[in-house]
Image (cartoon, rainbow, N blue to C red):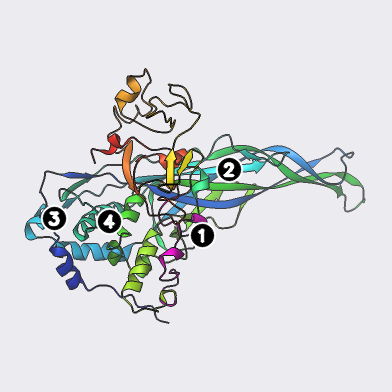
Amino acid sequence: MKKIQIALPLALLTFLFAAKSTQAKLLEEDTLYPANSIMCSEFDLQYQSSQTSTDLNLPVGEARNLKEVAGEILIEQMDFPNFAGITANLQQALPKLLSQEENEQLNLEAPSLSNKLTNYVSGTDDSGSVTQATVNPETTADQPGWFTKILSQSWIACGLTGGCAGPKSLNIKVAKPAVYSPPPSVCAFGLNTTGEAVGNLVNDPTQFTIISWLKRTIQDIIDDISGIISGKKITDLATIKNQGSGMLAGGGSFNAQIADSYGAVWAEAKDLEGNGPVKNSSTYHVSDQFAIQGDDDLNWALSKGQKAFCLQQCALHDYGYDVSAEFDFCLSCNPDDYPLDPNFGSGVDDVPLDMSLCQWDPDIQGCHYYDPGGTQGCGPNQDAFCESGRCNPFEYGQAEDFLSNGCSLPYSDRGTNCNVASICQWAHFQKNPAGGFGACQYRNPDVCVRTDRIATGSCAAVCNNACCAWQ
């Protein structure tokens, strides 16, 4: 069946949204603090090495051998998702949605933001436990500037449609967010789409060393003429796992602003292809003793927009419409068919993190995050300021909470207080059918979180609400 996207005509969009035009307090400038999202890659490395020995007493056959293995992983090319439809629609629509005065004030900074991917290499020891590389290869890259511009444009559009507060000025600067490498457990995987190459790829470090069990095969080397055994051939084989995880700068903002109930009008089907998180090709280089087994593409986890797009299409048709027949990345017109479980592939709202400090509240059906056995103090796994006797060693508070108790600031490398976007910011989560909001099942949909929450791997990495009061 020919796929035809039904979108609201631009003239109708203009009529509906122009009335909500900010008539902005045209302040000197406003700053966009991009929220990050995850990016992932996963594949196996088939290791093989051969050597010969003159020791004729080596027994022929197969055995297991524990060995230190060294290698190299680097990315030679990383392709970025193609959002040509969204880019064109926003570029065409915004001038019509803003007044002449607002268009004259429109000034959108579009710096290239940097992302980072860490390759976590693992093997298996003699007990079957996972072994980790001593050093993890890392890659940083500059994303295209047009993606940064989409973040500012969609922020304005989101404000016009009522999906968010929107900027206070149309002169928008962009703060470059810090990017971290989260644990690989946050990742999920989907199918492919096309895109362009990112710039300034820097691979450092590239080398890794790991101790792992290998299958060792010993064979006789027999002289073709004399038929005499002249030595032994030793072949080592092993499968080493590589899980790459990193942060896409601005991906969280893209998900929030493009995937709200109105934001999906800017998307086109070609921007969201793939039955799962948006994924793109990459070119890895590995050292000669290794061969890549499986899919080495990068998953950008931007599929929240797929849900919004699919449900919007459903709203534009009569009851009984089969959206999956029209768009193969749509599941159905039932919102419950797009769950939070990232293993399903939707990853529509949040990523799975450690919930071990969740204290379930049956009355509000959500989690308080604290350690019932925790103590107040400045040491490891202690809370500098336990509110109402509840200690959360992952929580950031105001500087005075730490300093008045004789503790140093855990975020001193980024600021003198928690009220900056590089340390804490608001995050909005969807309702979780299992209770609470987001994969962490927070008590509220809006939570003041640490900007490195995903990197910590813990749902408890939140901030005191006072840290976000400035936003």
Locate residue 95 relative to residue 273 in the image: left or right. Answer: left
Which quadrant of the figure contains the C terminus?
top left
- Residue in view at x 34 percent, y 26 percent: 412
Alpha carbon separation for disc pair 1 and 3: 39 Å
Q: From the image, tell me which residue sits under label 1.
A: 344
Q: Which residues are magenta?
A: 325-351
Disc 2 target residue = 121
Amino acid marked by disc 3: Thr
| Nearer the observer, 47 or 405 | 405
In magenta segment, residue 332: yes
Comes first in the chain, label 1 or label 3: 3
Classify mark 3: helix, strand or loop. Answer: loop
Callout 4: helix, strand or loop?
Answer: helix
Q: Of the two numbered discs 4 and 3 on the same chain, state the one appearing first in sequence.
A: 3
For the residues labelled 2 and 1, the Cα–Cα distance comes to 24 Å
Disc 4 target residue? 150
Q: How much space separates mark 2 and mark 4, taking CA atoms?
A: 34 Å
Helix, strand or loop at label 2? It is: strand
Kind of residue at badge 4: Ile
Residue 103, compared with residue 377, is above or below; it is: below
> In the rendering, at what x and y percent does residue 231 appear?
85, 43
- Residue farthest to the top, as pictured: 406
Q: Amino acid at mark 1?
A: Phe
At label 2, which amino acid type do we have? Val
Q: Which residue is mark 3?
A: 22
* Front position in the image: 470 or 39: 470
Q: Is residue 260 above or below residue 28?
A: below
Q: Pick the residue in front: 53 or 248.
A: 248
SS of the residue at dot 1? helix
Closer to us: mark 4 or mark 3?
3
Label 2 or label 4, whichever comes before in sequence order: 2
